[in-house]
Image: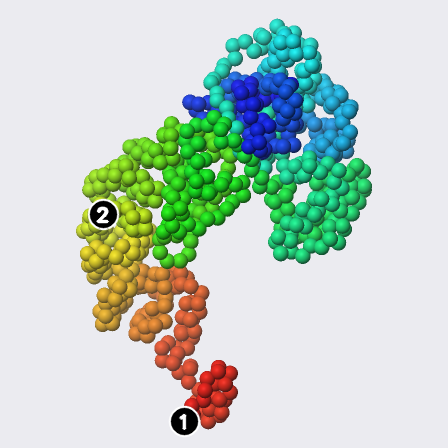
C-alpha cells in the first residue's frame, strides 16, 4: 500500500495503531539545522490516508509513503519563491490577459464539476456526491474519469513542483513492482489519479528528477487539533468543519437526529431551554430543505439553517457557539511518550504531566497561589516558557491585593512543537534553555530598559545564574547612564522585581541597592530636567512621575521616600519648573500629607496669581487636579479660590484657557463631574449648604413617623424628645 506522504516518515508508520497514538495527530517534518523550515502532514480519524495506513498495519500489509521527499520539496518551494518572474507592465493588455488566465488556473478544478452540477460551493458538491455515499463500488472509476476530463480540458501552466511529485510517485510505484508486489493500492489525492495511470516513460521521470536539491530532515508525530485541520499544510487542503466530518464518519446513516441532539445538549449546558419537540422540528425542517434542493440527504448547510430557525430563534450568535463547539470542535490528539523526541520537548511533556497542566485545544484558566508549592512550580514553568518565546500560557490581570496570586490562560497550539524543537539548541531542559536564552539576549543588549525588562521576567522564572549576570549588567549600565528619563522608566519594573522577591523568597538585596542608587541619581538630576521643556515632554514626565511615585510608595523604603519627597518640594517651589509638572508635584506632596492648609493655599495663590499668565495657571491647575477631582468637592477653600480666579478672567483670556480647563475636567470620572456641576450650579460652598435647608420643615410631624421607621428597622423605641 502506497500513501501520499513524505518517504522520510516511513519509520513513523510503525506507531500507527499504537493505543496511545490517537488522532488528530500530524507528522512533523523539519530541518534539524533550521526547525522553522518545516511542514505538517495532519491526520484525523476520518482521513482516508489514516484509515488506509491503519488497515494496512492491522492486516500486516506492507505500507510506505510515496510522495516527493519533504527535504526536496522544502528547497524546491524556496527556489520557486525566490525565482524572479517576468511580468508585463501594469495596466497593459498582456497583464490583463494574464490576470484573467490566473483566475481560471487558480480556481479549484473541482469547482468546474460542481458548477456543471448546479452547485455554488464545490465542497458541498463533493460532500453530497461522495462523502455521504454508503455504496462506493463504482465511485473510484467515476472520480478517475472526472479528473482525466478536467486535466485534459483545463489549460495547464508550468507547475514544476506538482510535476516532480507525480514523477516521484510513478517511480515509487515502479520500485514496488520491481520488489514483486503484484497487488498495489495507491492512496492519493483525486487530481493525481490520471497522472499515475498514464504510461509516462521511466526515462522522462528520471530526467525530471535528476539533480534535485535535498536537505536533511527529521520526522516525529505531534498532537494536532481540530481547529488546526482548517490550515493548508502538507499534502492536503484545509477542512472547514472537522467536527461535522467526525460526526458523519461515526454516524453515516444519521438523518440529523443524532446531530440535533448534540446541538440541544450544547444549548442545555448554556442554560437554554431546548426540548425534544425542538429537535424533532429542526430535523424535519433540515430534511424538507434537502428535498426542496434536490439533495439525497440533509447536509451541514441544511442542519445549520434548521438550527438557526428552530433552536436559535434566528440569533446568529448562538449558531456561532455551534460552529466553535461542534462544527469545528476542540478535540486534540495524543502521542505516545516513547516516540523519539528532542530532549527539551521530553522535559516539557514530563513537567506538564508532573504539574498537572495538560495541553488542551480549548483554553483553560488557572489561578495560582504562589504560597502553594505546586502552584509556585507551575508559575516558574510557565514563566520559563515565556522566556523561550513559547506563549502557551498568557498571564491575565487579577483583582485583589497582594502579589501571591497569578491568573493564567493556557491554550495549546500544535505550532509550539516547532518552536520547542528550534529552542532545543539552547539546552536539554526548560531551566537550562530559558537561562541560556536570557544570557543570549543580555549579551547583545546595551539598553538599560532591555536589561531591566529581562530581569523583571527572569525573577519569577527563578533563574539564579541569569539573574546574577543581569544584575551585574544593570548596575554597570545604570552607573553610566546620564538620561534621567531612561532611569525613571526602569525603576517601576525593578520595584516589581523587588516585590516578586518577597513572594518567591528570592534575595533581592542587590536589586534594592540598585533601585536606591538609581533613585538617588534621579533626585539629583530631575529638577533641572523639568525646566524649559515643551508641553508634550512635560506630559510624558508627568506620566513617569505618577509611576515612580506609585512604585516608591509600594516599596515602603523610608530613606528612598524621603529623598523623593524632598525632590518634589524643590520642583514644586521652583518658579521655572514647567507649570503642569509643578502642579502635579504639589498634588503629590498634598496626597502625602506634607502640606498643611496654609502651605497648600500659599502654593495655590502663587500659581493662580493674576500677575502670571492665565495659560500657565490653567496648566498648573491641570497638573494639580490630575487623576481626581474629589479634592475640589471636599476643600471649599480651594473651590472658592479657583472660582474667584475663573470669575476674574477677561472674556478673551477665558476663551484661551477654556480648552485647558475642559481637558482637565474631562479626565474626571462621571460621578465627579456630575457632583462638581451640581456644586457649581448651587453657587459654590455657601449655596451648596443652603440648598439642603428647608424653611418649611415641620419637626413635630416628622417625629410622628419615627416609631414606624424604627419598627421597620427592628430597633426599640427608647423615647423621642
In the image, is 611 to the left or to the right of 176? left
* Residue ID at (50%, 14%): 213
Kind of element beneath mark 2: helix
In the image, is 386 to the left or to the right of 279? left
Which callout, 1 or 2, points to the residue nearer the camera?
A: 2
List x then y, in percent, for residue 658. Answer: 38, 63
Q: Is residue 430 above or below residue 661?
A: above
Q: Are marks 1 and 2 in contact (CB under 8 Å)?
A: no
Name the residue carrying label 2.
509
Q: Determine the residue located farthest toward the top in the rendered image.
A: 203
List x then y, in percent, for residue 570. Answer: 19, 59
Note whether residue 567 is visible: no
Q: Is residue 353 above or below residue 607?
A: above
Quadrant of image for the N terminus: top right
List x then y, in percent, for residue 184. Answer: 67, 15
Query: Which quadrant of the figure has residue 249?
Result: top right
Q: Is residue 619 above or below residue 112?
A: below
Closer to us: 483 or 128:
128
- Mark 2, residues whose alpha carbon is within 10 Å: few (<14), some, or many (≥20)? few
* Residue ID at (73%, 53%): 276
List x then y, in percent, for residue 549. Answer: 28, 56
Name the residue carrying label 1.
721
Note whether residue 330 is visible: yes
Closer to us: 664 or 134:
134
* Residue ID at (43%, 42%): 355
- Mark 1, residues whose alpha carbon is within 10 Å: few (<14), some, or many (≥20)? few
For residue 171, the mark is none
Q: CA distance from mark 1 to mark 2?
A: 65 Å
Amino acid at each position: 500500500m502506497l500513501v501520499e506522504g513524505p518517504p522520510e516518515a516511513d519509520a513513523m508508520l510503525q506507531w500507527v495503531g499504537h493505543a496511545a497514538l490517537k488522532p488528530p495527530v500530524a507528522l512533523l517534518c523539519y530541518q534539524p539545522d533550521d526547525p522553522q523550515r518545516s511542514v505538517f502532514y495532519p491526520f484525523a480519524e476520518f482521513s482516508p490516508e489514516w484509515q488506509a495506513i491503519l488497515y494496512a498495519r492491522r492486516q500486516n500489509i506492507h505500507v510506505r509513503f510515496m510522495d516527493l521527499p519533504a527535504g526536496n520539496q522544502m528547497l524546491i518551494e524556496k527556489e520557486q519563491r525566490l525565482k524572479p518572474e517576468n511580468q508585463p507592465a501594469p495596466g497593459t493588455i498582456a497583464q490583463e490577459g494574464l490576470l484573467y488566465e490566473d483566475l481560471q488556473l487558480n480556481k479549484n478544478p473541482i469547482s468546474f464539476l460542481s458548477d456543471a452540477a448546479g452547485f455554488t460551493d464545490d465542497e458541498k458538491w463533493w460532500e453530497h456526491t461522495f462523502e455521504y455515499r454508503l455504496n462506493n463500488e463504482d465511485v473510484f472509476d467515476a472520480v478517475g474519469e472526472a479528473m482525466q476530463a478536467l486535466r485534459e480540458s483545463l489549460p495547464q501552466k508550468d507547475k514544476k513542483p506538482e510535476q516532480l511529485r507525480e514523477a516521484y510517485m510513478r517511480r515509487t510505484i515502479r520500485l514496488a513492482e520491481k520488489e514483486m508486489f503484484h497487488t498495489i493500492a495507491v492512496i492519493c489525492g483525486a487530481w493525481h489519479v490520471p497522472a499515475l495511470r498514464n504510461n509516462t516513460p521511466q526515462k522522462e521521470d528520471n530526467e525530471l528528477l535528476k539533480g534535485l536539491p535535498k536537505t536533511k530532515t527529521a520526522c516525529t508525530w505531534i498532537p494536532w487539533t481540530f481547529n488546526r485541520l482548517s490550515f493548508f499544510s502538507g499534502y492536503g487542503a484545509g477542512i472547514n468543519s472537522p467536527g461535522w466530518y467526525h460526526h458523519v464518519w461515526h454516524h453515516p446513516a444519521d438523518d440529523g437526529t443524532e446531530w440535533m441532539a448534540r446541538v440541544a445538549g450544547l444549548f442545555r449546558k448554556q442554560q437554554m431551554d431546548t426540548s425534544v419537540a425542538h429537535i424533532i422540528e429542526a430535523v424535519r425542517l433540515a430534511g424538507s430543505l434537502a428535498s426542496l434542493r434536490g439533495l439525497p440527504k440533509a447536509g451541514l448547510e441544511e442542519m445549520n439553517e434548521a438550527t438557526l430557525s428552530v433552536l436559535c430563534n434566528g440569533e446568529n450568535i448562538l449558531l456561532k457557539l455551534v460552529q466553535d463547539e461542534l462544527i469545528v470542535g476542540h478535540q486534540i490528539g495524543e502521542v505516545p511518550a516513547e516516540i523519539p523526541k528532542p530532549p527539551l520537548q521530553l522535559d516539557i511533556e514530563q513537567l506538564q504531566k508532573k504539574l498537572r497542566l495538560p495541553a488542551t485545544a480549548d483554553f483553560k484558566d488557572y489561578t495560582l497561589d504562589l504560597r502553594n508549592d505546586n502552584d509556585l512550580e507551575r508559575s516558574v514553568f510557565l514563566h520559563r516558557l515565556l522566556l523561550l518565546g513559547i506563549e502557551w500560557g498568557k498571564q491575565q490581570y487579577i483583582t485583589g491585593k497582594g502579589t501571591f496570586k497569578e491568573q493564567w490562560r493556557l491554550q495549546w497550539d500544535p505550532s509550539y512543537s516547532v518552536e520547542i524543537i528550534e529552542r532545543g539548541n539552547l539546552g536539554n531542559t526548560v531551566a537550562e534553555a530559558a537561562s541560556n536564552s536570557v544570557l543570549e539576549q543580555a549579551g547583545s543588549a546595551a539598553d538599560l530598559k532591555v536589561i531591566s525588562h529581562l530581569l523583571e521576567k527572569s525573577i519569577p522564572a527563578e533563574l539564579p545564574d541569569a539573574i546574577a549576570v543581569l544584575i551585574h549588567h544593570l548596575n554597570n549600565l545604570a552607573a553610566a547612564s546620564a538620561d534621567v528619563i531612561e532611569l525613571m522608566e526602569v525603576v517601576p519594573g525593578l520595584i516589581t522585581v523587588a516585590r516578586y522577591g518577597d513572594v518567591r523568597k528570592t534575595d533581592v538585596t542587590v536589586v534594592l541597592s540598585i533601585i536606591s542608587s538609581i533613585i538617588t541619581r534621579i533626585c539629583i538630576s530631575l529638577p533641572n530636567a523639568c525646566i524649559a521643556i515643551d508641553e508634550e515632554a512635560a506630559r510624558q514626565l508627568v506620566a513617569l512621575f505618577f509611576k515612580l511615585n506609585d512604585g516608591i510608595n509600594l516599596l515602603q523604603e523610608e530613606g528612598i521616600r524621603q529623598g523623593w519627597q524632598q525632590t518634589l518640594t524643590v520642583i514644586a517651589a521652583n518658579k521655572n519648573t514647567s507649570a503642569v509638572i509643578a502642579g502635579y508635584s504639589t498634588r503629590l506632596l498634598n496626597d502625602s500629607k506634607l502640606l498643611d492648609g496654609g502651605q497648600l493655599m500659599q502654593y495655590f495663590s502663587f500659581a493662580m496669581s493674576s500677575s502670571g499668565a492665565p495659560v500657565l495657571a490653567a496648566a498648573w491647575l491641570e497638573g494639580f487636579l490630575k487623576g481626581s477631582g474629589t479634592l475640589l468637592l471636599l476643600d471649599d477653600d480651594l473651590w472658592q479660590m479657583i472660582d474667584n480666579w475663573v470669575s476674574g478672567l477677561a472674556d478673551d483670556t477665558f476663551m484661551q484657557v477654556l480648552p485647558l480647563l475642559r481637558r482637565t475636567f474631562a479626565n474626571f470620572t462621571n460621578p465627579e463631574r456630575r457632583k462638581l456641576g451640581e456644586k457649581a450650579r448651587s453657587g459654590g460652598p455657601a449655596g451648596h449648604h443652603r440648598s439642603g435647608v428647608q424653611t418649611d420643615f415641620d419637626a413635630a410631624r416628622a417625629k410622628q413617623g419615627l416609631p414606624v421607621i424604627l419598627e421597620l428597622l427592628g430597633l426599640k423605641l427608647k423615647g423621642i424628645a
